[in-house]
Image (tube, helix red, strand yellow):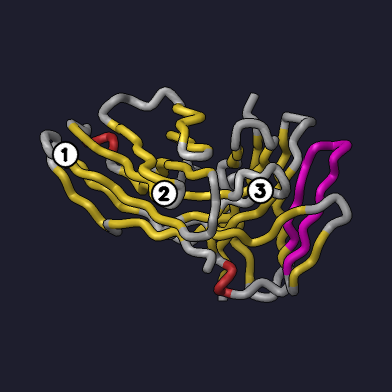
Amino acid sequence: RKEVEQDPGPFNVPEGATVAFNCTYSNSASQSFFWYRQDCRKEPKLLMSVYSSGNEDGRFTAQLNRASQYISLLIRDSKLSDSATYLCVVNTHTGNQFYFGTGTSLTVIP
Amino acid sequence: DTEVTQTPKHLVMGMTNKKSLKCEQHMGHRAMYWYKQKAKKPPELMFVYSYEKLSINESVPSRFSPECPNSSLLNLHLHALQPEDSALYLCASSQDSALNEKLFFGSGTQLSVL
């Protein structure tokens, strides 16, 4: 079983739409959770850390459900510039191990 | 300064060549990483250095040889690579403090092996 499972998509949504990505993790000892954004041929960049209480940054909302072992990312009012691959990343804090989901591809269409 | 610097940005090499990828960070991070990423796949961990010591080697072939000269620098020496080694090689760093660790990536080296 993979450490982190993520729907690869692709998600093709119109501008202004709301889109949600989910990710599940297998290790209940996982401590830190993140969403990274990666543009084509670029490096992954940290989008948001994910906390149990949920956190919001403008149009982006991240949630963590420890009981069900999943994290989510909600993007409201999608912009063309949101088109990218979104990577779910989990850290167990043992041995500097970060586990990556396969990434979810998002294309926002005019 | 939240930057991880990688050089070169692009590299084309033959199977008999020897080359090195370089990575530098000045954020005081004590963990540094090499990842390999193929198109449409997530980054795949190769090596981790923690406090300048190799802590993880994910069964990487010996034609890839990492080196950590000091806490700010990380190199990846390449020798006798195969065409299937062509990929984006990403360096990353983290604080290694076990408190909300975050990975910071360099812009990567796009490697083509002919």
Q: Secondary structure at mark 1?
A: strand
Residue A3 placement (x, y as % from top left): 65, 31
Q: Residues within 10 Å of mark 2 (few under 14, many from 20)?
A: many
Residue A87 placement (x, y as % from top left): 59, 50
Q: Which residue corresponds to mark 2? A: B90
Which sits in the foreground, B112 or A15?
Answer: B112
- Residue at figure coordinates x 73%, y 66% from the top left: A60
Is residue A95 depicted above or below A23 in this figure? above
Visible residue check, residue B45: no
- Residue at figure coordinates x 74%, y 36% from the top left: A30
List the single residue furthest toward the front: B70
Q: Secondary structure at mark 2?
A: strand
Question: Magenta stretch containing residue A28, yes or no?
Answer: no
In the image, which disc is placed on residue B18? 1
Q: Are marks 2 and 3 on the same chain?
A: yes
Residue type at mark 3: give it.
Glu
Residue type at mark 1: give it.
Lys
Which sits in the foreground, B59 or B53?
Answer: B53
Q: Which residue corresponds to mark 3? A: B101
